[in-house]
Image: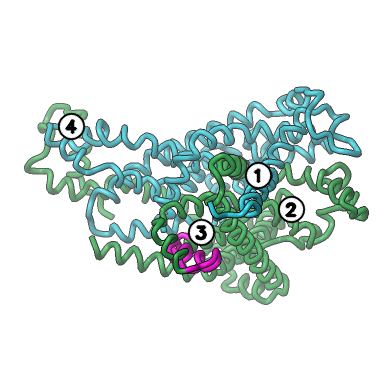
Chain colours: A green, B cyan
Amino acid sequence: MAVQPDGAVEQTAPRTGKGGAPPTRRGGGSRRAVRGAPYLLLLPAMLATAVFLGWPMVRNLLLSFQNLNMKELIQHLTDWRGIGNYQEVLGSEQFWRVTLRTLVFTAVNVVLIMVLGVLIGLLLARLGTKMRLTLSAALVLAWAMPVIAATTVFQWLFDSRYGVVNWLLDRLGQHGMAHYDWVGSQLSTFFVITVLIVWQSLPFVALNLYAATTTIPRELYEAARMDGAGSWRVFTSVTFPFLKPFFLATTFLEVIWVFKAFPQIFAINEGGPDRLTETLPIYAFTEGVGNLHFGMGAAISLLTIVVLLAMTAYYLRLTVTREQQEENEL
Amino acid sequence: MKHSLAGRVWPNATAAVLALGFLFPVYWMFNTAFKPTRDIITEDPVWFPVHGTLEHFATAVHAPDFWILAGNSVLVTVLAVGLSLVIALCGAFALTRMRFRGRKGILLTFMVAQMAPWEVMVISIYLIVRDADLLNSLLPLTCFYMLMVLPFTLLTLRGYVAAVPKELEESAMVDGCSRRQAFLKVVFPLLAPGLMATSLFGFITAWNEFPLVLVLNKEPAMGTLPLWLSQFQTRFGDDWGATMAAASIFAVPILVLFLFLQRKAVGGLTSGAVKG
């Protein structure tokens, strides 16, 4: 993208207006200046994106074809390895197990978040003002809780000796759970992580769904009720079709967020026990930075991005088409 | 009106249970932080901090490097969000108010950039920063945090800029303002609430960021609070009182900010970047 010097003059001249050529105000030079202005305004953003996002991406790609372990790192060696890293990763049973685990983990969380979030959102719409504000306030607090703080609190809630959860289960008659070690097995660790992620993500879906339902014209509901539709019918024939873009966008965001969930899983048990709760991002991290196999880690992280793209391809295509349509309408 | 008694009771009852469920972890954090240890390590939980104490906060604040790390966190967050706001506002203005070639492509670039999986890019970022000899420095953190929040900020601000009527700007220009003056004097003040709401998510992202600082800044005094908090429990054994006090200290700024800005932010989020 060429920077047009005229644009720069127009941008700075009126302010400084120092000697020499009189500052060009609107008039003769403005056509050219206006043509350059948008690029100039966008330049910092594009430049920053290229340097701090584009370059790491390219570097990641290059790395994934290199053999870069402890030795190469210290001696600053570049040892090209071709597609060796990919062959090794794709040939390992571990990678496929982690991928499958990640897909199941993402699916379970997203389904829970969307179903419960929509139910809570619809509930908000049915409540009286007082109760709605109470529930909204609780949701906002949970939503605002910083991830690492929330993770620490959940570790405490699920503490084996003095945690409230075990105390409650014991009281409810599950005496075997009195000192249960939640991070001792794969499934129970995932259970804690899932409760944490769902708890954190529900407020976003619920509050936004509620906000979105308020935009639906009342007449639509009244008409549906007149036709004798029950709650489920009203949802499927009015709410859902009307808010379809919202559902798509939210599901898409949740897929990305859950898939990328890093601090929650890492801080709860660092992917343990025995690396059994590692999802793809954690796996790439442990292999790359933890075990100092940077080339392998880079290959895994690229494959992770491919998996993420595949999962969100449908929505991405939809967005691109919509943007193009909007562009054509302008 | 025609709902039965049960029909009116169950939504409220469910809502009450849900509100409790969402509040409890937050409440329990504060409750534990303010209780003396003998009330924390008990067979039956002590539900209210009846013997309130600040000793755990003292422990947390006197932990090694706390003030340095808090300073780091504030500095990096404020700089990253401030920079991204300025850069994004320029870009958002161009994207909403001007027609030019390549506009669609640039827009799409930011939409894709918004989904960048930073969590899996730590490997290459680590090597880039190492090669630049900037490990254990706040500069790379600031730059990368700035970019983490930039696409979202830009796309969201677009909505706010578009909401300011173009006529206001034009009439200011008719009255003799330059385009730049029109922007600073007319559009900018109207954008202030939008800027505040948008910055909230930037603050949260930067304040919370964990994987990158975990890899880049291993030196104890160069970390940020998320790193400190995640290692707190390990360092302090099972001192849950101090750990919860540390979590409270970390959470309070965001909770306060959120409560103030939430209303605007939710609207902005739905109408801007995530518009349906």
Type of the residue with mark 2: Glu
Q: Real-space Cα distance between discs 1 and 3?
A: 22 Å
Residue at 68% of width from left, 39% of height from top? B26
Q: Real-space Cα distance between discs 3 and 2?
A: 28 Å
Question: In terms of secondary structure, what is the magenta stretch mainly?
Answer: helix
User: Dot 4 corresponds to which residue?
Assistant: A14
Count of residue discs: 4
User: Dot 1 corresponds to which residue?
Assistant: B19
Residue at 58% of width from left, 32% of height from top? B253
Q: Real-space Cα distance between discs 4 and 3?
A: 45 Å
Type of the residue with mark 1: Ala
User: Dot 3 corresponds to which residue?
Assistant: A250
Residue at 52% of width from left, 63% of height from top? A62
> Which of the pair B8/B249 is nearer the observer?
B8
> Which of the pair A229/A193 is nearer the observer?
A229
Give the vertical position of A150 relative to B182 (above or below).
below
User: Dot 2 corresponds to which residue?
Assistant: A270
